[in-house]
Image: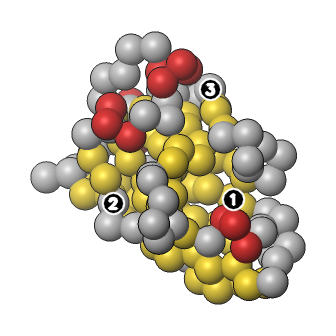
Amino acid sequence: QVQLVESGGGSVQTGGSLRLSCAASGYTLSRNYMGWFRQAPGKEREGVAGMSTAGNTYYADSVKGRFTISRDNAKNTVYLQMNSLKPEDSAMYYCAAASQFPWYGAYWSQSSRYNYWGQGTQVTVSS
């Protein structure tokens, strides 16, 4: 049974940093396409970062240069390092996984293409 569990969320001030983790069980992350998404109240879920099976990374324009997605195959865990956080980064953050994903580079941010989702971890950035 596949399970993704996020952790690392919390409350920080503007300019602070957090590192989110997404640990998988029953699933080998390195063989799958991974994404981080976020959803703020009243807003649609949006893709934040993605990583292909080859290790190619993709980012939303709003987080480029501040967020970094990475993967530790030995720990079967994907991370999202978030630096220079802004109040507009406040949201519930989710990790997602897909075993097959044609044209990943073009469509990585489409949430409907991911098969598995974690329960989310809350990030709150205060000004």
Calculate the distance from the C-alpha at mark 2 to the C-alpha at mark 1. 17 Å
Circle 3 crowding by C-alpha within 10 Å: few under 14, some 14–19, many from 20: few
Residue that label 3 marks: 56
Q: Quadrant of the C terminus?
A: bottom right
- Secondary structure, mark 1, is strand
Q: Amino acid at mark 2?
A: Gly
Dot 3 falls on a residue whose secondary structure is loop
Q: Picture coordinates of residue 74 (x, y %)?
A: 48, 49
Q: Amino acid at mark 1?
A: Gln
| Above or below, 67 relative to 33 | below
Q: How far apart are the two marked residues, 3 and 1, measured between alpha carbons? A: 16 Å
Q: Earlier in the sequence, mark 3 or mark 2?
A: 3
Of label 3 and label 1, which has the lower sequence position? 3
Q: How many marks?
A: 3
- Give the amino acid at mark 3: Asn
Task: Note whether residue 16 is visible.
Answer: yes
Asked if disc 2 and disc 1 are in contact, CB closer than 8 Å, the reply is no
Within the image, what quadrant is residue 80 found in?
bottom right
Q: Which residue is mark 1?
A: 81
Find residue 45 and report its horizontal and vertical position in percent.
Answer: 45, 52
Residue 114, numbered circle:
none
Query: Residue placed at 49% from the left, 30% from the top?
Result: 108
Where residue 85 appears, as percent x and y from the top left, is 77, 68
Quarter where residue 50 is shown: top right
Quick one: SS at disc 2? loop
| Residue sitting at x 48%, y 24% | 107
Above-or-below relation of 84 to 78: below
Question: Within 10 Å of the Cα at label 1, are there few (<14), some (14-19), or many (20+) other Cα atoms?
Answer: some
Residue labelled with disc 2:
118
